[in-house]
């Protein structure tokens, strides 16, 4: 059973954090430790965790009665055990039935910025017969990205000012829903991902594999052979490990920009509350874990060449820090601390009509 939400876990976490930095063991420590364990017990943890807490109480009682059997090592072992129990076991706020099979209305969105050199080739490789609409959102590029997209016969929206990578995606998804999309595929317009995989991503959603489908570069060609820089591979592996530990999604990677979403996912997840920068993608996956959505992966190959857009080392470090902050917010939210971008909106509220494409 899911843990009851309340103030117990945040209070227990505060007590445990204080005791972990205490170099001594005294009566106050023991009383506070017992209180923290009692607060965790009140959240109805699984049976094995209850047994661990009760065992700690028995050892504590032995010390109080006989004066033996308790050491500083015991205190820290019990403290660390309690700290692990603070992590909520079930962050889901709702469950969703599997989508019905069949051909859905498919919309491909391309968040574009200075993509004039690569856009034509990318659009030419999208299997047009397999999709219903293609939307290019130009984030105030100084080149002719928007004009080229219009000439190529796709829907175009151009921001009057730069809103960032995450801000661009917000426009993409909002307008895709207004286009009556059942499945929305995000494809980068820089040629880094193979557009011919769009139908496969769509079918994975339609077949009920998940509400969020990821095109993973680690399930296809070795990223090193594909040209991914070594420092990016290292960062990807470290962050993916941390995210799997916290979110429990067991994905091969979390940082691909090739994704497909179901309509109900985008209508439920408050993506408008997310960051306007690159950590938007991480927040979406955190939201998927928090709201109980199924995430599925298919193999994709990343392409690395001169005109493919890519963030540099400094921006990557900032992105990594923000990713860890997003994971921290996830844990805190599961412990009862509110977070706007982890509070789902009601599904099926988006009016289905044609967007204004400027």
Image (spheres, helix red, strand yellow):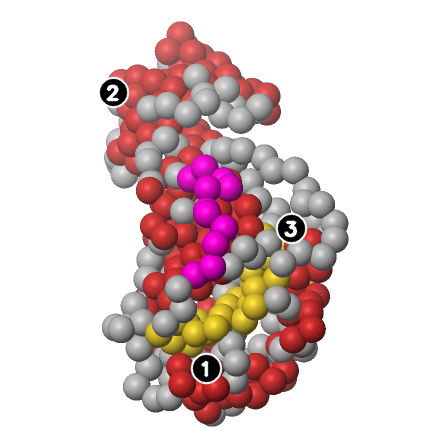
Q: Residue at x 48, y 14 (%)?
A: 58
Indicate yes or no whether the magenta region holds residue 265: no
Q: Quadrant of residue 70?
A: top left
| Residue that mark 3 sits on | 210
Disc ID at residue 261: none
Q: Residue at x 61, y 47 (%)?
A: 294
- SS under mark 2: helix
User: Who is closer to the viewer here, 145 or 280?
Assistant: 145
The crowd level at tag 1 (other Cα within 10 Å; few <14, some 14-19, many 20+) is: few
| Image position, residue 223 (x, y; %) | 60, 77
The residue segment tinted magenta is 345-355
Rounded to the nearest angstrom, the CA distance separating label 2 from label 3 is 50 Å
| Image position, residue 291 (x, y; %) | 51, 40
The crowd level at tag 3 (other Cα within 10 Å; few <14, some 14-19, many 20+) is: many
Q: Quadrant of residue 358?
A: bottom left
Q: Residue at x 53, y 48 (%)?
A: 265
| Residue that mark 2 sits on | 28
């Amino acid at each position: 059973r899911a843990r009851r939400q309340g103030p117990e876990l945040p209070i227990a976490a505060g007590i445990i954090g204080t005791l972990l930095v205490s170099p001594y063991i005294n009566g106050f420590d023991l009383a506070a430790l017992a209180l923290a364990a009692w607060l965790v017990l009140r959240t109805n943890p699984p049976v094995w965790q209850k047994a661990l807490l009760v065992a700690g109480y028995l050892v504590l009682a032995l010390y109080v009665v006989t004066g033996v059997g308790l050491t500083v090592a015991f205190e820290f072992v019990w403290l660390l055990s309690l700290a692990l129990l603070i992590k909520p076991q079930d962050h889901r706020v709702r469950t969703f039935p599997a989508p019905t099979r069949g051909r859905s209305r498919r919309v491909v969105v391309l968040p574009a910025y200075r993509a004039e050199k690569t856009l034509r080739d990318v659009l030419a490789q999208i299997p047009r017969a397999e999709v219903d609409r293609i939307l290019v959102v130009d984030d105030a590029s100084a080149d002719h990205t928007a004009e080229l997209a219009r000439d190529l016969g796709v829907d175009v929206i151009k921001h009057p000012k730069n809103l960032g990578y995450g801000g661009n995606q917000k426009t993409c998804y909002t307008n895709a829903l207004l286009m009556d999309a059942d499945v929305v595929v995000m494809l980068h317009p820089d040629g880094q991902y193979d557009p011919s995989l769009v139908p496969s991503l769509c079918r994975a959603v339609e077949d009920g594999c998940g509400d969020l489908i990821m095109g993973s570069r680690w399930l296809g060609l070795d990223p090193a052979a594909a040209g991914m820089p070594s420092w990016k591979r290292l960062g990807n592996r470290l962050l993916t490990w941390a995210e799997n530990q916290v979110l429990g999604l067991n994905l091969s990677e979390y940082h691909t920009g090739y994704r497909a979403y179901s309509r109900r996912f985008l209508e439920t997840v408050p993506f408008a509350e997310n960051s306007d920068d690159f950590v938007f993608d991480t927040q979406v996956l955190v939201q998927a874990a928090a709201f109980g959505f199924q995430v599925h992966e298919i193999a994709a190959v990343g392409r690395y060449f001169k005109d493919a857009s890519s963030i540099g080392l400094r921006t990557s470090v900032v992105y990594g820090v923000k990713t860890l902050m997003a994971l921290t917010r996830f844990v805190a939210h599961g412990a009862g601390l509110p977070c706007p971008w982890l509070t789902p909106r009601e599904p099926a509220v988006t009016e289905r009509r044609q967007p204004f494409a400027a």
